[in-house]
Amino acid sequence: MRPVWVVDDDRSIRWVFEKALTREGIPFETFSLAQDAIDALKQGAPQVLVSDIRMPGTSGLELLQTVKAQFPALPVIVMTAYSDLESAVSAFQGGAFEYLPKPFDVDQAVDLIRRAIDESAREEAFEEAPTASPDILGQAPSMQEVFRAIGRLSQSNATVLITGESGSGKELVARALHRHSQRAARPFIAINTAAMPKDLLESELFGHERGAFTGAQAMRRGRFEQAEGGTLFLDEIGDMPPELQTRLLRVLSDGTFYRVGGHQPIRANVRVIAATHQDLESRVREGQFREDLYHRLNVIRLRLPSLRERREDIPLLARHFLARSSKELGVEAKRLSDAAMTYLNAQDFPGNVRQLENVCHWLTVMAPTQVIEVSDLPPELRDGPIAGGDSDWKAALGREADRMLARGESSIMDSLTQTFERTLISKALAHTAGRRIEAAGLLGIGRNTITRKIQELGMDERMEEKPAA
């Protein structure tokens, strides 16, 4: 890990950080002048920068601007006096990770630095994460399988049927299949077959001759002709009207079609990729989709997982969408706090990746501070049900275990068990207004056990047992 830099002209402040960071085993360097830190940037960036605002010569805000220009993802913690809140606001506007008011508690400062280190590590992992496409992100095993399928299909012209819930990214996968195929230099044409009336859809797909119907004042090439040599993506194929299913089947069978009102067959050299969120097998059984067309389309099936099936990708996607929204709007990228990220991770996201993208765009515009908290999330997410119901705490426990394992921590079982016991005892005592006997009874343990646990867990030693009511 790269060192944490502390910049402050106050020798005593630097001394406090030196002792605290040494105790925590965190590498560090200290500077008495902002300009010295700027000069040191030529040799590389720190993991985290902690800087005072008011210093002789170059100020902390000027240092922040310089650092952000060279290393936009570097977390910067600014120190400021309580009377210096205007500077704190300026720091946030300049992209500071957080501000530390003086005088500060040393443990609070170390905790803030650790959070910034975690943020820095996540940003680095995000920047280095290999992806199958700039537009498709995913580290979950189910998405890795999708990426492998795209690779295997890169040299194939086979028809592909992509299935998955609305908003799961079916068109992105279709574009990736095209981009990695031998047809990449030719057009990619997409059409949503559920978005237009039957008569208009027929003309859109196959084109029409002049005078074929009222208003057809000129010949028009359809999507099949526009995609010549390339790929035609038919989204929501399950909603295609029966008459057009027959015409599409003919194109897939013999490779030719007719424009509306035309008599001359036109050969189609097009790879068809279809997508649907519906159960086509059920629609075949119900007589709403042609079985022979289904088998023509279902040569290669690629199923996209829903976002709730790949929750481990939510942080990766959220950071990507926040960064993209900030770039589009020309503002500093915002960051999700650990609590906000955990909350997002617990959501079902019925609209899948598209819904998460919209949430991130909303946050870029509406969140009041640089670091997004749970209270900043859209009302429909804050007020809505959290995914997982009674099992959500188990998912949160699993994510915490994953985080600790990834950091190489030891004694994880003891640490999590103590946190679990401390939480239960605290809640039980709060429920019984501090009466230990009642709390022990609710927890199913003895009075001596709860007393011993309170002592072992370092809970409030001055806690006096309240008499039973």
Image (cartoon, rainbow, N blue to C red):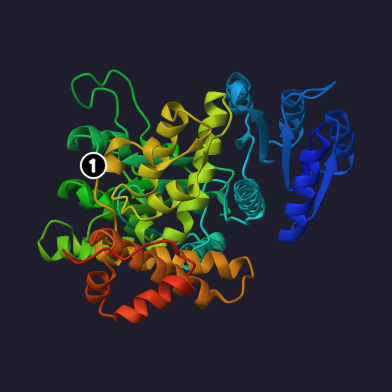
Residue 438's place in the image compared with 42, above or below, is below
Res 301 seen here: no
Q: Quadrant of the N terminus?
A: bottom right
Q: Name the residue located 62 percent from the left edge and 51 percent from the top edge.
A: 107
Res 459 seen here: yes
| Number of residue marks | 1
Label 1, secondary structure: give it: loop
Residue 27, image quadrant: bottom right
Q: Tell me where residue 103 appears, x and y as whole percent.
A: 64, 35
Residue 269's place in the image compared with 143, above or below, is above
Residue 142's place in the image compared with 90, above or below, is below
Q: Name the residue located 17 percent from the left edge and 46 percent from the top edge.
A: 241
Could you say which is closer to the camera, residue 440 or residue 324? 440
The residue carrying pointer 1 sits among few (fewer than 14), some (14 to 19) or many (20 or more) residues within 10 Å by Cα, namely some
Residue 451, image quadrant: bottom left
Q: Tell me where residue 427 appears, x and y as whole percent.
A: 31, 62
Could you say which is closer to the camera, residue 208 or residue 148? 148
Q: Name the residue located 65 percent from the left edge and 53 percent from the top edge.
A: 121
Q: Tell me where residue 461 appears, x and y as whole percent.
A: 45, 64
Q: Quadrant of the C terminus?
A: bottom left
Could you say which is closer to the camera, residue 414 or residue 271? 414
Left or right, 359 with respect to 84, comes to left
Q: Name the residue located 59 percent from the left edge and 55 percent from the top edge.
A: 131
Residue 412's place in the image compared with 461, above or below, is below
The residue that mark 1 highlights is 194
Q: Tell me where residue 125 appears, x and y as whole percent.
A: 64, 55
Residue 46, image quadrant: top right
Instruction: Give the residue type that dot 1 points to.
Output: Ala
Could you say which is closer to the camera, residue 468 or residue 100? 468
Left or right, 298 with respect to 152, comes to left
